Amino acid sequence: MFVKLGNWLFHYRNFLFPVFYAALFIPSLPVFTKTIYAETAGVVIILAGMLVRAITIGLVYIVRGGRNRTIFADNLVTEGIYHICRNPMYLGNILLLLGFGLFANSLWFMAVFFPLFVLFYAAIIKAEEAFLQNKFGDEFRRYKKNVRALIPHLDRINTAFYGHSFKWKKVLSKEHNSLYLYLSGILLLLLLKERMEFRLFIVVFLLISVIYGVIKWFKKRRLLED
């Protein structure tokens, strides 16, 4: 049942998950009485999530976007960051949503939407594991036994990335849309909570929009390819 739910969520995730970001703007009681605590904790965790995603993409990256919106993998990657954590992209996404929930200082989001988001990802992970175990058999079972699904093995950091080079162009190429969404969301939350003046919001938003447009221009002309 959980695997079936995971397959269904994987198929429709691009339509469902933006709803969670929209939920950040629902009026709610605060998590912290002092906004600065919420914003500080939120920014730190958001940056951690962005870093995890960047490392995953910039070093050893696997394609798990599926095929025809169904779970698919052509090979089992166990090196680099995947030697530390089996699902680093999902870990990064969970950290991002946790960070945004704290940054928005939304008790409603943290109590309802964030746990639901984690539950959805747990179902997707189960569905992916069922696929990988069926395709790779004992190889995946050994990998699953030695590497945790989401909690990283921090003691392996020194050796996990040996021999790998970080490709920042690949990160910009694949992450520029997400980065634009993250930064725009932060600015909008600051504006709605009256933590930023409208004029400053417009200036900063235009600045990041110009940078985003330049990156799109570079990508279109294949200048971000290694």
Image (cartoon, rainbow, N blue to C red):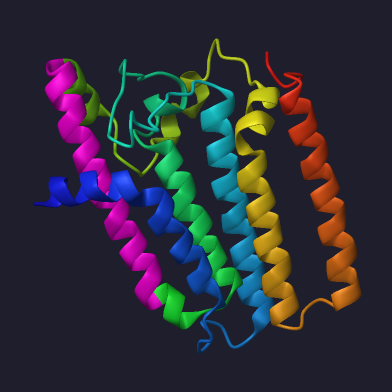
Q: Residue at x 68, y 17 (%)?
A: 225
Q: Quadrant of the C terminus?
A: top right
Q: Whole-percent x and y of residue 171?
A: 64, 30
Membership of 123 in magenta stretch: yes
* Tag count: 0
Q: Residue at x 75, y 76 (%)?
A: 191
| Above/below status of 124 relative to 104 | above
Residue in the foreground of this view, choosing between 122 and 8: 8
Residue in the foreground of this view, choosing between 144 and 210: 210
Membership of 199 in magenta stretch: no
Q: Which residues are magenta?
A: 111-138
Q: Whole-percent x and y of residue 160?
A: 46, 21
Q: Residue at x 70, y 70 (%)?
A: 188
Q: Tell whether 95 sits left or right of 177.
A: left
Q: Whole-percent x and y of residue 215?
A: 77, 34
Q: Residue at x 60, y 70 (%)?
A: 103
| Above/below status of 23 relative to 58 | below
Q: Give the residue furthest to the left.
A: 1
Q: Tell whether 209 sits left or right of 72.
A: right
Q: Give the residue furthest to the top.
A: 163
Q: Whole-percent x and y of residue 62?
A: 43, 24
Main SS, magenta residues: helix
| Above/below status of 98 relative to 133 | below
Quarter occupied by residue 17: bottom left
Quarter occupied by residue 104: bottom right
| Above/below status of 26 relative to 180 | below
